[in-house]
Image (cartoon, helix red, strand yellow):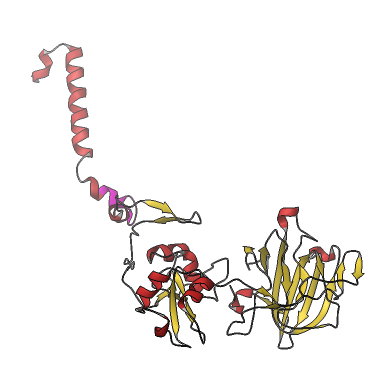
Amino acid sequence: MHPLDQWPAPKRLYTQLASWSLGLLVLTSINVSNAAFEGGEGVGKEYLSLDATAVNITDDEGYIIKAMPLEGQATFDLNRTEIVEHEVQEGETLSMIAYRYGLNLNSIRYANTNLGSSDYLKIGQKLKIPPKDGLYVTIPNGATLVALMDKYKGNLDDTKAFNGIEDDSDLTSGEQLFIVGGKPEVVYIAQTNSGNSSYNTAGGYSSYGPDVDSYDVPVNDLGWIRPTKGIITQGFHGGHPAYDIADSSKPDILAVMDGTVVDTGTGWDGGYGNNVWIDHGNGYKTHYAHMTEFYVQVGDTVTQGQVIGQMGNTGRVYGVTGIHLHFEVSYNGVKISPSFMGVW
């Protein structure tokens, strides 16, 4: 006779249920880790590789980045004094790279002038990483430390300490100087005052022109200048083969290189509004659109830095907040990213 047969039926049932529950609990708790691995290829490994101490933070532009990446080697080095080269890996963004090296995003842009504003990166792309926030400049003849700091808005004491110099006698013309905390100089400076160029709005031509007809603008190694000042609100991508450069103060628009005006448009003109095409005679053409007015006609010869118009919001632009320059570059008829110019 079974020992439980002598117990009342309810008591036997409760005892059996308790025994089965206890046995099931023991069975399911055996070798849980193996069960996790068998639940899917690599599931257990991925789970175990997570670092519970890792936290997410955001950079100045709002991008979420990990304070301690799960993979890779930390490269932050406060004592670095030379530029290093970084090869872009899969999944990396400019914000992530800047954080890894402990730098401001713009410092990497200053060292890599071929970067577009959209900051698109390609796997295998090589980036120059400066040692600190700031930029390298070539020392001109007769330069002084105070003048350089004023021009590039750098920190004098930190710059002297970083470069190991004491005073102006340590500066050598033609050599590179790293200006700690520095920023590029102002885009352009007014040089002449004209007032007799023709200009065009949706209503036609007039006998007066811009207050300033040309600017003294730093030319980069590739021979280009920026067409205007402002921030880039949209970069080059599919469906938008141009840069949009915005500034609500409606700054002047400049010819980025010598050339000939080959086409203009007014009013709507396919959404471009008041716009100008310039052929630079070397396979390159540039297109400047949405201007509130422009000061050139087809057949005009323009020089680099010449004011050809004023930023506006004509054509397919929405409201006063849409004031910007739509700037395109084409080579032998094919539109290419303005980032190749190396001025951003």
Q: Is residue 129 magenta?
A: no
Q: In which quarter of the image is the N terminus?
A: top left
Residue 294: x percent and y percent? 81, 70
Does 311 appear above or below 65? below
Side of 313 where 245 appears, left or right: left
Report which quarter residue 258 is drawn in. bottom right
The overriding secondary structure of the stretch rendered in magenta is helix
Residue 78: x percent and y percent? 32, 68
Q: Quadrant of the C terminus?
A: bottom right
- Camera-side residue of 88 and 9: 88
Side of 208 where 291 appears, left or right: left
Residue drawn at point x = 76 percent, y = 58 percent: 317
Residue drawn at point x = 64 percent, y = 64 percent: 230
Residue drawn at point x = 86 percent, y = 67 percent: 266
Q: Which residues are drawn in magenta? A: 35-44
Residue drawn at point x = 44 percent, y = 87 percent: 172
